[in-house]
Image (spheres, grey):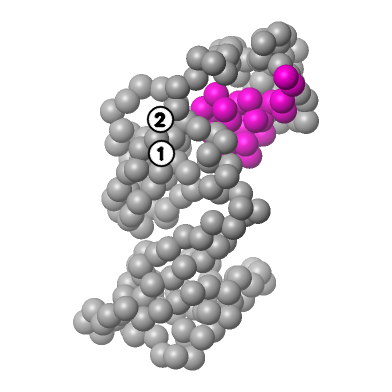
Amino acid sequence: MEERLQKLLAQAGYGSRRRCEEFIIAGRVRVNGQVATLGQKADLSVDKVTLDGKALPKAESLTYTYIALYKPRNVLSAAEGQDDRETVRGLIPLEGHLYPVGRLDFDSEGLILMTNDGELTNKLTHPRYGHEKEYRVLVARRPDEKQLSAWQRGVVLEDGDKTAPAEVNFLSTSGKGAWIRVVMGEGKNVRSAKWVNCWDCRW
């Protein structure tokens, strides 16, 4: 059965569908020797699909791997590094394609899922599935109720975007600061927000 190329690439363990679309746009994917185009379909039972010259395996030969990894601070949430910083992929002594589902900032720590299952990645990360993410955040000063309420309603970032409402609860004090629990359903580069810089958060 014919499937879109980005879905076939994701199923073969090359990353999320969005990431696989980038491979197609870059001209790195070929179908039966011809450079593929975005939106093109193929059937692996009759077509030869390659990425950088390497053929995709047949669906029946795929083996999926799932790893729950604790990401330390100062490690990139990436399968491949663009500089000399350590990546989560480098923490796993296994062969084959593995990539993180979602991401945590470089100086954040916590649970991250590593897999080669593109379909699962799509279902866990695409906004239409509505999965929530939970964080414990250490802030330099304890926020008051007004600040917590603003975060719960959604705040305007420096680029003009407004965050979606989030569940925010005070947990405990930590010196002059505090730990708070945040549950949100979207992902943004929150460090660009003035209110985060003001609070001096550590994720």
Q: Where residue 11 sits in the image (x, y, percent)?
A: 57, 27
Quadrant for the N terminus in the image = top right
**Please, is residue 34 above or below residue 155 in the view?**
above
SS at mark 1 in the image: strand
Q: Where residue 154 sits in the image (x, y, percent)?
A: 58, 77
Tag 2 and tag 1, C-beta contact below 8 Å? yes
**Please, is residue 131 above or below residue 46 in the view?**
below
Q: Where residue 13 sits in the image (x, y, percent)?
A: 51, 27
Q: Which label was assigned to residue 65?
A: 2
Q: Which stretch is magenta?
A: 1-23
Seen at 65% across and 22% down, the residue is 28
Q: Which label was assigned to residue 114?
A: 1
SS at mark 2 in the image: loop
Under mark 2, the amino acid is Thr
Instruction: Answer with left or right where residue 98 lies relative to residue 26.
Output: left
Seen at 45% across and 27% down, the residue is 64
Q: Quadrant of residue 56?
A: top right
Seen at 49% across and 74% down, the residue is 167
Is 148 colored magenta in this rendering?
A: no
- In front of the other: label 2 or label 1? 2
